[in-house]
Image (cartoon, grey):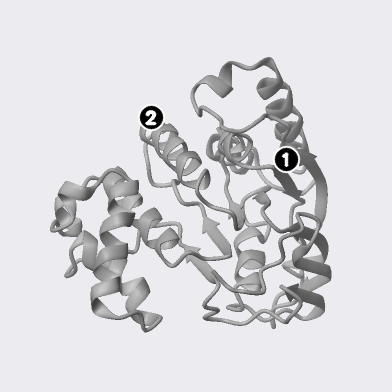
């Protein structure tokens, strides 16, 4: 872990002020005045209508996307691509098909210059944490989709990042496997002291995993509302859904997002597609 990691939970890891993003040739900005703070140790989920700029904002934090207006600080400095204290897990597992599960995890350490023997030890430990020790020598084609996502999670955690970015990490999974993967992530978070920022279309997933949920408006994106998730940890992904408070919070967020569809000129088919994606 990086030595100067702030230990005060009120310390800001990510600070965005009035962030705007214009794209040449587009009449409408993607982001327009996004402001938020993410403290050390927080798990924050971004939700909102499809195409509202959630992943774009995540890429801004990662230093992969330039912004037009406003200010962004990551641990007090401008965003920078390839930070050694940050890990980014993409929407798909993105495993290299010619590498084994263990070799895919080792790659994250190899890029950071970790010696070979240490890479092997840490990769094996990461596989053990996600219950895939026996699959270390298997290639991507030999793994189920759920197993691939577990390897991808192991790869994201193996570098011991201070900031973890997740972009729809379980979007490709069926409903049952997605809940199992959410439980897997909850267990990994029990050993993780860093900050997490996740983009998801799944409101239930956001409630299950996050400490705070930020709702983006339709494009041009602004912060529509923020919700604190007060369920205590550790959490059980399946049992949590039976809590009455879960349904109340889900309905509030759902109404925020669907309400964005009432006057933006989209067709009923577009709205139905969005509602299906959110369920």
Q: In which quarter of the image is residue 139?
A: bottom left
Residue that appears at 31% across and 73% down: 107
* Residue 148, horizontal then vertical, whole percent: 29, 52
| Earlier-in-chain disc, 2 versus 1 | 2
Frontmost residue, 112 versus 249? 112
Frontmost residue, 204 versus 124? 124
Circle 1 Cα neighbour tier, 10 Å, few/some/many (<14 / 14–19 / ≥20): many
Residue that appears at 37% across and 62% down: 155
* Residue 222, horizontal then vertical, whole percent: 81, 58
Nearer the observer: mark 2 or 1; the answer is 2
Asked if residue 160 lies left or right of residue 150, the reply is: right
Circle 2 Cα neighbour tier, 10 Å, few/some/many (<14 / 14–19 / ≥20): few
Q: Quadrant of residue 37?
A: bottom right
* Residue located beneath label 2 in the image: 176
Q: Is residue 15 above or below residue 193?
A: below
* Residue located beneath label 1 in the image: 257
For the question of whether residue 96 can be seen, the reply is: no
Q: Quadrant of the C terminus?
A: top right
Q: Do the residues labelled 2 and 1 touch (CB within 8 Å)?
A: no
- SS at mark 2? helix
Asked if residue 70 lies left or right of residue 149, the reply is: right
* Residue 82, horizontal then vertical, whole percent: 52, 81
Residue that appears at 52% across and 43% down: 190
Q: In which quarter of the image is the N terminus?
A: bottom right
Frontmost residue, 170 versus 48? 170
For the question of whether residue 136 can be seen, the reply is: yes
Spatial CA span between label 2 and label 1:
24 Å
């Amino acid at each position: 872990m990086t030595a100067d990691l702030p230990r005060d939970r009120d310390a800001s890891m990510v600070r965005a002020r009035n962030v705007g993003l214009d794209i040449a040739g587009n009449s409408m900005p993607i982001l327009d005045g996004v402001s938020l703070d993410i403290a050390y140790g927080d798990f924050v989920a971004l939700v909102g209508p499809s195409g509202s700029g959630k992943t774009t904002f995540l890429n801004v934090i990662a230093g992969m996307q330039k912004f037009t207006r406003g200010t962004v600080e990551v641990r007090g400095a401008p965003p920078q691509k390839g930070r050694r204290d940050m890990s980014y897990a993409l929407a798909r597992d993105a495993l290299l098909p010619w590498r084994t599960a263990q070799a895919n995890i080792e790659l994250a350490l190899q890029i950071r210059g970790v010696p070979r023997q240490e890479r092997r030890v840490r990769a094996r430990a990461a596989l053990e944490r996600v219950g895939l020790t026996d699959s270390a020598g298997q290639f991507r084609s030999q793994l189920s989709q759920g197993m691939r996502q577990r390897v991808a999670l192991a790869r994201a955690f193996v570098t011991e990042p201070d900031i973890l970015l997740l972009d729809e990490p379980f979007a490709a999974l069926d409903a049952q496997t997605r809940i199992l993967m959410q439980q897997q992530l909850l267990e990994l978070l029990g050993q993780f002291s860093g900050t997490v920022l996740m983009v998801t279309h799944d409101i239930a997933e956001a409630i299950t995993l996050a400490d705070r949920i930020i709702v983006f408006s339709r494009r041009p994106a602004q912060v529509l509302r923020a919700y604190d998730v007060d369920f205590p940890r550790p959490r059980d992904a399946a049992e949590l859904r039976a809590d009455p408070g879960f349904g109340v919070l889900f309905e509030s967020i759902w109404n925020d997002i669907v309400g964005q569809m009432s006057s933006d000129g989209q067709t009923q088919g577009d709205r139905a597609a969005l509602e299906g994606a959110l369920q």
